[in-house]
């Protein structure tokens, strides 16, 4: 009986060791397969990150920001011109009012002289 128990224990121990080795090998194979499958995806992600960096740096900093600054400059110049024109237009309006009253007065005086 002792021999059968020893053989059973040895069999269980060998099964356990074999299962551990198989699990390790299976994990290695799965990891290797997974790495092989994911490598193209990782490569594409790196390319995408590179392209995004290009878009962010080159397009944004070299194209968009300078154009925005140009638009802002143009807007500010136009705003200043309009603000300065308001004073000029107010002066012109008062001058026109004076001219109207003078022309009206002179027209009345000419009509009195002709009558």
Image: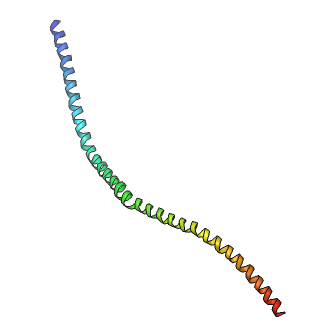
33 horizontally vs 80: left or right: left
Furthest-left residue in this view: 3
1 horizontally vs 44: left or right: left
**Where 15 sits versus 63, above or below?**
above
Residue drawn at (21%, 20%) of the image: 16
Residue drawn at (23%, 28%) of the image: 23
State the scheme by which the image is colored.
Answer: rainbow
Nearest the camera: 22 or 97?
97
Residue drawn at (34%, 58%) of the image: 58
Furthest-bottom residue in this view: 114
Residue drawn at (38%, 61%) of the image: 63
Examine the image and state in which quarter residue 80 appears: bottom right
x and y, in percent, of residue 1 in the image:
17, 6
x and y, in percent, of residue 18 in the image:
19, 24
Quadrant (top left/top right/bottom left/bottom right) for the C terminus: bottom right
72 horizontally vs 84: left or right: left
62 horizontally vs 28: left or right: right
Examine the image and state in which quarter residue 4 appears: top left
x and y, in percent, of residue 41 in the image:
29, 47
**Where 88 sits versus 35, above or below?**
below
Nearest the camera: 73 or 3?
73
x and y, in percent, of residue 93 in the image:
67, 73
Nearest the camera: 48 or 66?
66
């Amino acid at each position: 009986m002792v021999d059968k128990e020893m053989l059973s224990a040895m069999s269980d121990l060998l099964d356990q060791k074999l299962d551990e080795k198989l699990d390790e090998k299976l994990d290695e194979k799965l990891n290797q397969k997974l790495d092989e499958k994911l490598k193209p995806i990782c490569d594409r992600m790196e390319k995408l990150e590179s392209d995004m960096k290009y878009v962010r740096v080159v397009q944004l900093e070299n194209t968009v920001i300078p154009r925005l600054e140009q638009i802002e400059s143009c807007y500010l110049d136009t705003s200043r011109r309009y603000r300065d024109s308001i004073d000029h237009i107010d002066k012109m309006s008062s001058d026109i009012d004076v001219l109207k009253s003078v022309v009206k007065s002179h027209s009345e005086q000419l009509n009195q002289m002709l009558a």
